[in-house]
Amino acid sequence: MGVLVGLLILVAVIIGAVVVFSNRNSASAAGDVTVQSCSADPAGGKPTASGTIVNHSSKTSNYVIRLKFTDAQGNQVSEGVNAVRSVKPAANAVWKLLGSRGVKGPVTCKMSGVNRTHLPGQ
């Protein structure tokens, strides 16, 4: 009985890993995401960014967007992350995120990562 339970746990872990790693398609997922706005708070608060997602995959997908805010010299001054769930195939979605710390002066945004995942059966 103990061996069977151990074997079932091992199979579940392997299936979970295959689903997670096969669904993460950063290269093509990054092509689904655009940055439309990137701005600093004039009072030195946290910067903001927003944009759109167009799901080019054939599955309803969840996205995690990571963004770096940089100053005029190219130094990273803040970062942000946001998740957008259940974007249907060929559908558009809007995303917004807030930087992790306040900055002074103008900023530019650079996408540092996009992960697209879907649940089995979707």
Image (tube, rainbow, N blue to C red):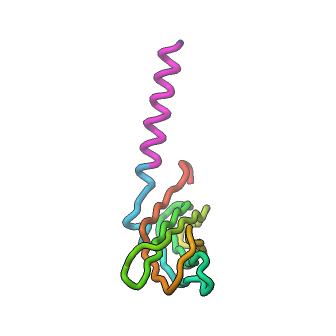
| Residue 15 part of the magenta-drawn span | yes
Of the pair 114 and 101, the residue shown nearer to us:
101
As drawn, 72 above or below 98: below
- Res 41 seen here: yes
Q: Which residue appears at 55% of the width and 79% of the height?
A: 51
Q: Quadrant of residue 95?
A: bottom right
Q: Which image quarter is the C terminus in?
A: bottom right
Extreme residue toward the top, this view: 1
Residue 43 lies, in percent from the top left, at 62, 84
Residue 39 lies, in percent from the top left, at 55, 84
* Residues shaded magenta: 2-20
As drawn, 117 above or below 33: above
Q: Which residue appears at 48% of the width and 83% of the height?
A: 107
Q: Quadrant of residue 100?
A: bottom right
Of the pair 44 and 55, the residue shown nearer to us:
44
- Res 92 seen here: no
Of the pair 1 and 111, the residue shown nearer to us:
111
Residue 106 lies, in percent from the top left, at 49, 86
As drawn, 5 above or below 102: above
Q: Quadrant of residue 60?
A: bottom right
| Residue 105 part of the magenta-drawn span | no
Our reading of the magenta stretch's main secondary structure is helix
Q: How many marks?
A: 0
Q: Which residue appears at 49% of the width and 63% of the height?
A: 58
Q: Which residue appears at 57% of the width and 65% of the height?
A: 82
